[in-house]
Image (spheres, rainbow, N blue to C red):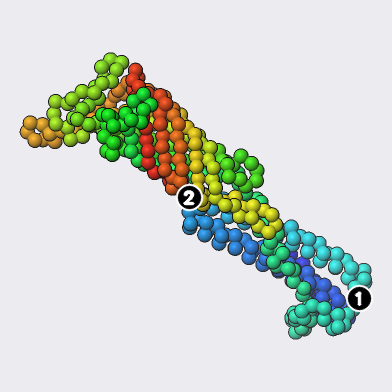
């Protein structure tokens, strides 16, 4: 409101002081036009950035929360720029009024307007000529984009991903891969599922290919026994015994929470701008990760399903820890392209106490920005 009132008073002064109106008018309209251009350029730049953010959100490159945060940041930034730049123009207007009061403004002729584009401006019944030399919009846009790139998501050291993995589960005896052929558990019927959230932080301030990846995951491991067997807890040991009925299902499931830690090499090609700024792009190419995990079990249960002598289907759920180690830790690795990877995990501590069998998982992993 203060800006509008000031402009109105200046234009009224122009209309009522005909002898001095030309030079005074020319300078006022220049400043007025610059204010209009400042507002328009900042709004256009904001609109372009919002469109770019919406495109990234639609492609799945950023999350909804990240998109909202970026929009708030750039809206606040451009509002501040308008305030700063318009305040400077208002200061020039005040100086111009003072010069007018002191009689320092001289009259001009129409020939003085030929250095720029000639436009007209109407106040009441009077039409005035004035010139406008627009700022280089490309230069303004370039400066604004450079400032946004340096302060925006493209330069953030840490990003976040939603993780989902699934695959097959089994055990190794004495760390030997060959023991899979003699496993008591079904290879393709034993599954695992993992759901989690990770953060990915690069080691350097500038864009690079090396990252530290860490997070939180919930894991469900299922082991299905062969040969009509079940798990039986005998004191401090858990053994396998043949069930008296013909089992349709014999499955041991344990849920756990894990904290994965990986070093990731992301070979996505970073984009370099003409001004030398490097845009850090991830999950666009080959990715390789090595590391491990540590966690603890949340619960264990055994599912048994069979038909009794009357051909009635019976389902039994046994709640027990079956002497499983509560704390588990191990190594893991993945290699993939973009958001999809081949994934392997191996527990370094035994699955059950006083045994030498350890859980191994292999499957597909999705890391979604």
Q: Where residue 312 sits in the image (x, y, percent)?
A: 10, 35
Left/right placement of residue 70 relative to residue 161 reads right
Q: Where residue 181 sits in the image (x, y, percent)?
A: 28, 32
Left/right placement of residue 43 relative to residue 343 reads right
Q: Quadrant of residue 226?
A: top left
**Residue at (33% x, 20% y) in the render:** 355
The mark lying in front, picked from 2 and 1, is: 2
Choose the circle earlier in sequence order: 2 or 1: 1
Left/right placement of residue 51 relative to residue 143 reads left
Q: Residues within 10 Å of mark 1 (few under 14, many from 20)?
A: few
Q: CA distance from mark 2 to mark 1?
A: 67 Å
**Residue at (74% x, 68% y) in the render:** 135
Residue 106 is marked as 1
**Residue at (54% x, 47% y) in the render:** 267
Q: Residues within 10 Å of mark 2 (few under 14, many from 20)?
A: some
Secondary structure beneath dot 2 equals: loop
Residue 338 is marked as 2
Q: Quadrant of the N terminus?
A: bottom right
Q: Where residue 199 sits in the image (x, y, percent)?
A: 52, 41
């Amino acid at each position: 409101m203060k800006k509008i009132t000031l402009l109105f008073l200046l234009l009224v002064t122009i209309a009522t002081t005909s002898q001095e109106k030309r030079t005074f008018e020319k300078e006022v309209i220049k400043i007025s036009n610059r204010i209009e251009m400042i507002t328009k350029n900042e709004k256009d730049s904001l609109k372009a950035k919002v469109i770019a953010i919406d495109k990234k959100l639609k492609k799945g490159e950023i999350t909804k929360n990240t998109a909202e945060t970026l929009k708030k940041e750039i809206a606040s930034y451009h509002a501040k720029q308008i305030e700063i730049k318009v305040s400077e123009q208002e200061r020039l207007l005040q100086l111009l009024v003072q010069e007018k009061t002191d009689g320092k403004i001289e009259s001009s002729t129409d020939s003085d307007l030929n250095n720029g584009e000639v436009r007209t401006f109407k106040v009441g019944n009077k039409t005035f000529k004035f010139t406008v030399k627009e700022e280089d919009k490309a230069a303004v846009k370039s400066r604004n984009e450079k400032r946004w790139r340096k302060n925006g998501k493209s330069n953030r050291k840490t990003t976040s991903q939603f993780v989902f993995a699934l695959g097959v589960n089994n055990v190794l005896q004495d760390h030997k891969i060959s023991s899979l052929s003699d496993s008591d558990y079904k290879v393709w019927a034993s599954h695992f599922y993992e759901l989690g959230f990770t953060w990915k932080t690069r080691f350097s301030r500038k864009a690079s290919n090396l990252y530290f990846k860490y997070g939180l995951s919930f894991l469900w491991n299922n082991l299905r026994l062969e040969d009509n067997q079940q798990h039986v807890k005998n004191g401090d040991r858990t053994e396998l015994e043949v069930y008296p009925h013909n089992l349709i299902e014999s499955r041991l499931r344990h849920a756990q929470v894990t904290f994965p830690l990986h070093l990731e090499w992301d070979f996505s090609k970073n984009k370099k701008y003409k001004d030398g700024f490097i845009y850090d792009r991830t999950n666009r190419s080959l990715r390789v990760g090595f590391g491990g995990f540590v966690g603890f079990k949340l619960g264990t249960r055994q599912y048994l399903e069979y038909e009794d002598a009357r051909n009635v289907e019976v389902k039994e759920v046994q709640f027990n820890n079956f002497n499983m180690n509560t704390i588990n830790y191990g190594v893991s690795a993945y290699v993939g392209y973009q958001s999809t990877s081949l994934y392997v995990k191996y527990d370094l501590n035994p699955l059950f106490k006083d045994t030498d069998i350890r859980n191994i998982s292999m499957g597909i992993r999705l890391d979604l920005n």
